[in-house]
């Protein structure tokens, strides 16, 4: 047994095979097979097809570009016939009982790595050839498909780091836990893992090689450990812990259907943060009063082109309908900083977190903004949608947004399209917004405090930089004062105020937020019932008096 320790991003226990995510290579699904002989035959057949394709390419290249350039395809053929390459693929299929696609991807990546680490420049360049040929064999295999009864095995995902767009493209049904070598506690990837409710660790010195890939592991999100090939005693201990966790969850489920009212009668809304319509199920299951933050940018991150108005409309409509009259606050796109979309073709920036991000993109590319607003206004006919604007710093921005929104409504009316009148609120996630929250409140229907960015910008600490984790302190009095200031401004103007940053789920602060008068907390679905329990047990007046 080996134990690797990291920092916990999301609690829970998960057990399963470890799947090492290889960057820049096609992410091939690992599937458990039952008939290794048949799988090896599939590989052999795919190889014959690949060699035929390469021969055709060689012939074409010979005519078009001459023998010396065409020779590359001869090298490819040599690789695909190479004994060592073939043996390692077949061995992997036999001993690990994995599908041919996975074995080719895995062995191909190891071979490519071996070439890349050679001193000889010619040999180094062969690494790309190995990757290329492996891709070709996999694409032949993909088309033929496995005839076997295969069940895709859920797995523990191990990676160096994951970008938000890589995280959203994962097949979440299959990911049991996420363990990364890098990555900060406050990154969007960490937030996504919490939203998905799966155990996750960052900063774990797990070797991401063949020695780990495919081995059995247990992730303990609470202690921040991953056990590789756990011994009997650890297995037994983890089983007990898992059982206790389940019991705790069941106990909390008894709170379903209860209102979130304090002992002295203050009612608070508990909403869920989601990144995807698939997360709606968890929100409903955990009895969310609504959705407090739908991070719509993930719709953009999942695609390699701009989502159309119709595609967005269908998603927002589905969210509104699924929540059946409960409030769904959809945040307009917050692309930029760590959430990069290639097709946005943004210029490279020295300081992306202080750069063209979120509302700044929308205000400089009004057509892009209008497409999203049209979809939101149209979808709001089907439920209680509210629109929320991120990264606000100034009153003029909100005024400009309102003008664009009015234009969108006028256009929809002219075209005879149905649309609703959703509330429009803003995020308070910059110190500027907190400081001018009095003025902003007059232009907004509600506030939602984004404590993740508010902490980053107030303390001047990059939330992505894991080395700065000790300095990233959302409990800092400066941050708490900003929150309190925003709450007071909202109430003075008679509008509600919530918290949708990760701090909203911090149980050590729940009473403090209640005392400040926060009207709503929006948290990852699994945090809703634990917070309900605290609210039901709190007397706000007494807490205030005892401070
Ligand atoms: C925040 O900044 O607190 C927030 C909720 O937005 P995000 O984490 O998506 O930047
Ligand atoms: Mg933010």
Image (cartoon, rainbow, N blue to C red):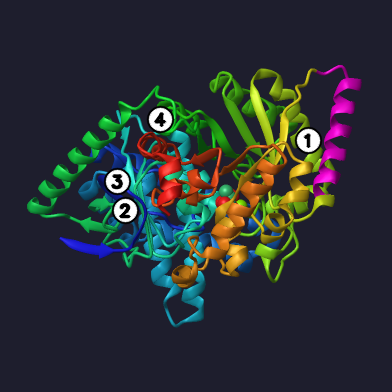
Disc 4 on helix, strand or loop? loop
Do the residues under discs 1 and 4 have CB atoms within 8 angstroms? Answer: no
| Magenta residues (range) | 397-417
Q: List the residue tagged with mark 3.
A: 12
Badge number at residue 371: 1
Image x and y of residue 449, in percent: 60, 48
Residue for point 59% across, 19% down: 325
Front-most of residues 397 and 407: 397
Residue behind mark 2: 89
Q: As drawn, is 344 to the left or to the right of 105?
A: right
Q: Is residue 188 above or below residue 207?
A: above
Residue at screen point 54% across, 21% down: 322
User: Are discs 4 and 3 less than 8 Å apart at CB?
Assistant: no
Q: Secondary structure at mark 3?
A: loop
- Residue at image position (44%, 70%) is 470
Query: Looking at the image, is mark 4 or mark 2 earlier in the sequence?
Result: 2
Q: Which residue is mark 4?
A: 286
């Amino acid at each position: 047994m080996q134990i690797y320790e990291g920092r916990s991003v999301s609690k829970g226990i998960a057990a399963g095979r470890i799947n090492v995510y290889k960057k820049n290579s096609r992410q091939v699904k690992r599937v458990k097979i039952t008939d290794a002989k048949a799988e090896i035959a599939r590989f052999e057949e795919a190889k014959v097809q690949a060699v035929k394709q390469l021969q055709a390419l060689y012939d074409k290249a010979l005519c078009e570009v001459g023998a010396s350039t065409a020779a590359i395809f001869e090298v490819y053929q040599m690789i695909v016939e190479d004994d060592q390459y073939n043996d390692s693929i077949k061995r992997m299929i036999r001993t690990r009982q994995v599908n041919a696609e996975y074995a080719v991807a895995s062995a191909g990546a190891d071979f490519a790595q071996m070439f890349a680490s050679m001193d000889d420049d010619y040999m180094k360049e062969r690494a790309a050839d190995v990757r290329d040929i492996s891709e070709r064999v996999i694409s032949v295999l993909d088309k033929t498909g496995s005839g076997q009864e295969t069940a895709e095995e859920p797995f523990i995902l191990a990676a160096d780091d994951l970008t938000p767009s890589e995280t959203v493209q994962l097949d979440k049904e299959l990911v049991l836990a996420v363990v990364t070598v890098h990555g900060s506690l406050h990154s969007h990837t960490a937030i996504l893992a919490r939203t998905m409710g799966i155990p996750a660790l960052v900063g774990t010195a797990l070797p991401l090689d063949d020695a780990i890939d495919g081995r059995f592991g247990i992730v303990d999100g609470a202690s921040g450990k991953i056990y590789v090939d756990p011994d009997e005693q650890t297995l037994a201990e983890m089983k007990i812990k898992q059982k206790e966790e389940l019991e705790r969850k069941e106990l909390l489920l008894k709170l379903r259907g209860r209102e979130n009212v304090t002992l002295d009668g203050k009612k608070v809304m508990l909403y869920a943060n989601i990144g995807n319509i698939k997360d709606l199920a968890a929100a409903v299951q955990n009895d969310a009063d609504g959705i407090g933050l739908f991070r719509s940018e993930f719709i953009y991150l999942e695609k390699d082109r701009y989502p159309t108005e119709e595609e967005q409309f269908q998603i927002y409509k589905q969210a509104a309908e699924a929540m059946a009259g409960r409030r769904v606050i959809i945040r307009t796109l917050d692309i930029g900083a760590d959430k990069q979309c290639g097709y946005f073709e943004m210029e490279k920036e020295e300081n992306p977190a202080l750069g063209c991000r979120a509302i700044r993109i929308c205000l400089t590319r009004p057509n892009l903004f209008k497409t999203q607003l049209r979809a939101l206004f149209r979808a709001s006919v089907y439920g209680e949608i509210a629109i929320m604007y991120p990264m606000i710093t100034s009153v003029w921005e909100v005024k400009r947004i309102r003008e664009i929104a009015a234009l969108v409504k006028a256009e929809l009316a002219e075209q005879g399209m149905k649309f609703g009148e959703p509330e429009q609120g803003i995020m308070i996630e910059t110190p500027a917004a907190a400081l001018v929250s009095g003025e902003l409140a007059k232009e907004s229907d509600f506030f939602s405090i984004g404590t993740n960015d508010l902490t980053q910008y107030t303390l001047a600490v990059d939330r992505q930089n894991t080395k700065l984790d000790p300095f990233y302190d959302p409990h800092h009095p400066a941050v708490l004062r900003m929150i309190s200031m925003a709450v007071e401004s909202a109430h003075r103007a008679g509008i509600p105020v919530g918290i949708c940053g990760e701090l909203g789920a911090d149980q050590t602060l729940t009473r403090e937020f209640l005392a400040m008068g926060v009207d709503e907390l929006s948290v990852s679905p699994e945090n809703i019932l634990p917070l309900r329990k605290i609210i039901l047990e709190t007397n706000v007046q007494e807490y205030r008096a005892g401070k």
